[in-house]
Amino acid sequence: MALYQESCVPCRDGAPLLDAAELAELLPHLPGWVVVDGHHLQKAWSFADFQQALDWLNRAGAICEAEGHHAEFSLGWGHASAEVYTHKVDGLTRADAVLAAKLDGA
C-alpha cells in the first residue's frame, strides 16, 4: 500500500520515533521532502499566483483535519511550504510520512 493510501495513526506519548534507516527507506516515496535535523520533514511548492497557493493550502488543511494530524504551513505570493512532525513526541513518526505523502496530492 502506498503511503498516501494509509491513514495517520494517532500518536501517544512514548510512540516510537523513526530512526535514520527507517527515514532513508521512506524518503524515496516522498519526492522533494527533506529531513531537517532528523526532527521534521519540510517541503516547498511553487504556484502561478497567490490564489493558487491559497487554494492548495485550503486543500492541504482539509487533509490535516481529516487525518487529525496537522502540519505547520507558510504561505506567500506564488509559494507555500509545510513542516511536518509529531508534536507529542517532538520528532518523526510514520504518521508524518503518511501526512507528507497526502499533502503531495493536495
Image (tube, helix red, strand yellow):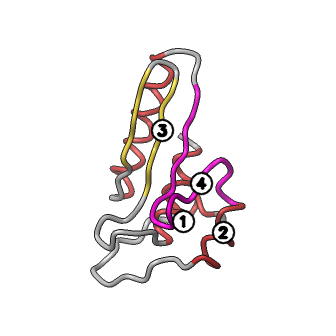
- For the record, the magenta segment spans 29-46
- From the image, tell me which residue sits under label 1: 6
Number of residues whose C-alpha sits closer than 10 Å to that of mark 3, classed few (under 14), some (14–19) or many (20 or more): some
Badge count: 4
N-terminal label among 3 and 2: 2
- In the rendered view, tell whether residue 84 sits above or below residue 95: above
> Label 4's element?
strand
Q: Residue 34: which numbered mark, if any?
A: 4
Who's the residue at 37% across and 82% down the image? 15
Amino acid bearing label 3: Ser
* CB-based contact (under 8 Å), mark 2 and mark 1: yes
Crowding at label 2, few (<14), some or many (≥20) Cα neighbours within 10 Å?
A: few
Q: CA distance from mark 1 to mark 4?
A: 20 Å
- Residue 67 belongs to the span the image colors magenta: no
What is the number of the mark on residue 81? 3
Q: Quadrant of the N terminus?
A: bottom right
Q: Residue furthest front?
A: 37
The quadrant in which residue 25 appears is bottom right
Residue 93 location in percent, x, y?
A: 46, 72
* Of the image marks 1 and 4, the number of the one nearer the N terminus: 1
